[in-house]
Image (spheres, rainbow, N blue to C red):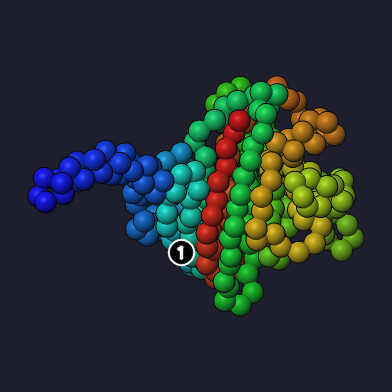
Amino acid sequence: MFAKGLTLILLAAPFLASAAPAELEARQNIDTSSHCGQWDVVTAGQYSLLLDQWGKDGATSGSQCAHLASLSGSTVSWATNWTWTGGTGVKSFTNIQLNQGINKQLSAISSMPTTWKWSQSTSGSIVADVAYDLFTSNTAGGSNVNEIMIWLANFNAGPISFQYGSDGKPVPVASSISLAGHTWNLYSGSNGANNVFSFLPTSGTITSFSGDLKAFFTYLTQNEGVSSSQYLVTAQAGTEPTSGSATLTTSAYSLAIN
């Protein structure tokens, strides 16, 4: 009786041993504590959570914190809560940054599949956006030449634009563009350091996005003079708050550069 039971345990042992690494790989141990420092960075697998409160000195008061929640394979979840008062400029861009596959020429990128599922709770009126933020350069790791933003939400904010209408609203350079399963208006401008191209949904807010970001680069190289020899040097996704109070919760985010 004892010998038979021991045999069964020994036979099962290899299966138990092989299952453990797979489980560890699927759901990795990460730092899930709250971080509130202006330039705090928390790494999780191929991603980094960046607090990036670059404009906080423009606020009369306020703060922002963020934390990672989980990392399962290539899917990360995270959240940030913020309250900013005063000033008309953006206070931060707390975001998830992809650290794998960057510094590749646009012509060499075959696809950039991504998924982003998020929700946001607010207190009163806010000014903010929720967006992908991508930068290209003439060289790998070089200075930014183009900034490509893909807005999933616009909360009383506005994209950078060379042209504004008599009502003070930015004027798109192209309208009703169908990309990645949605329809967008494209705005073009400059932030004083580099060109800025901003794709905004023609209506509503996209809280569950799944698509190929390569399609946006293809559109820009074919229609807006962006060179396919440019290198993708930064790939981020997060929120740019200007004022108000909100909590952004990302339940699932993934991005790959192939």
Residue 170 vs 231, above or below: the answer is: below
Q: Quadrant of the C terminus?
A: top right
Q: Residue at x 68, y 56 (%)?
A: 152
Tell me the quarter of the picture where residue 7 sits.
top left
Q: Identity of the amino acid at label 1? A: Ser
**Residue 92 percent location from the top left of the image:** 54, 54
Q: Is residue 226 visible?
A: yes
Q: Residue at x 50, y 48 (%)?
A: 75
**Residue 198 percent location from the top left of the image:** 74, 47
**Residue 33 percent location from the top left of the image:** 34, 58
Tell whether 239 sits left or right of 25.
right
Q: Is residue 93 visible?
A: no
135 and 208: which is toward the camera: 208
Q: Which residue is mark 1?
A: 63
Tell whether 111 sits left or right of 80.
right
Q: Residue at x 41, y 46 (%)?
A: 26
SS at mark 1 in the image: strand
Tell whether 202 sits left or right of 69.
right
Tell whether 95 sits left or right of 138.
left
Q: Residue at x 49, y 65 (%)?
A: 81
Residue 179 vs 141, above or below: the answer is: below
Q: What number of labels is visible?
A: 1
Kindly give the residue lying farthest to the left in the view shown.
Answer: 2
Circle 1 crowding by C-alpha within 10 Å: few under 14, some 14–19, many from 20: some
**Residue 201 percent location from the top left of the image:** 77, 56
Kindly give the residue lying farthest to the bottom in the view shown.
Answer: 124
Residue 118 vs 95, above or below: the answer is: below
Kindly give the residue lying farthest to the front in the view shown.
Answer: 1
